[in-house]
Every structure is written in C-alpha cells, then in structure tokens.
Amino acid sequence: MFEALRGIACFVTVTVSLIYGTRIAWVCGKKCGFKEKPEDKKQALSESVPAAAVVYTFGFLIVFSLFLDGFLTILISSLTSSILLSGFVVSMAMPELKRKPSTKR
C-alpha cells in the first residue's frame, strides 16, 4: 500500500514538474517577438529560463533516480537535461523561429 502511494506521489510530482516547467519556458518564448527590444528579451530570458530549468530539475531528479545509481550521476544528468529542455522549449515557442507558409503561388 505504501509503495503504491509513493509511486503515485512520484508520478504526480514528475508530471506537474514537466507541465509547469514547459509552461514557464513556453510563455518566455512567446514574449520574445520581433517587436521586443533586445534588452527586454535578455531580461525575460535571464529570468524565465533558469526558473524553468529549476522546475524541470525536480522532475528529472525523480525520474533519473529510478534508472541511475549514484547521487552525482543523477544530479548531473538531471541538470543537463533540464537546461537543454528549457532552452529547447523556449526556442520552439519563439515567434520568429516558427515556419510561416509562403503566400506566393
């Protein structure tokens, strides 16, 4: 019974961590448009990307602790994955990086 509750709590923690991390990174990427000044973009990126990475790290710590051994290995894998994922989500959400269909025929 305790193992089942522990598994449910871990699953919920990982899911919420990934959802909120993605939400933070996605909103940051949406803010960085063509009309924004570079200073505003830098400010938004310097605030949101580390916040998303920290939220992702909690989820990845739980996931990697199930599959890997050793605290240092788990910590380095979690930090690396969270930094890469937060940067990837921010870049995917940026309006200028989206492909716009051509109106020429």
Image: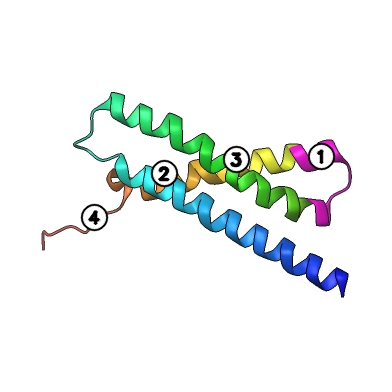
- 40 up-or-down from 52: above or below: above
- 98 up-or-down from 70: above or below: below
Question: Camera-side residue: 77 or 98?
Answer: 77
Query: Which of pointers 3 and 2 indicates the residue nearer the eye?
Result: 3
Does 41 appear in magenta? no
Give the main secondary structure, helix, strand or loop, of the magenta stretch. Answer: helix
Q: Position of residue 72 (x, y in %)?
A: 83, 36
Query: Which of pointers 4 and 3 indicates the residue nearer the eye?
Result: 3
The quarter of the picture where residue 11 lies is bottom right
Query: Of label 1 and label 2, which has the lower sequence position?
Result: 1
Residue at point 66%, 38% (across, down): 80
Q: Provide the secondary structure element on which disc 1 rests.
A: helix
Q: Position of residue 39 (x, y in %)?
A: 30, 24
- 61 up-or-down from 34: above or below: below
The quarter of the picture where residue 28 lies is top left
Query: Mark 4 sits on what residue?
Result: 100
Crowdedness of circle 1 by 10 Å Cα count: few (<14), some, many (20+)? Answer: few
Q: CA distance from mark 4 to mark 3?
A: 32 Å
Query: Mark 1 sits on what residue?
Result: 73
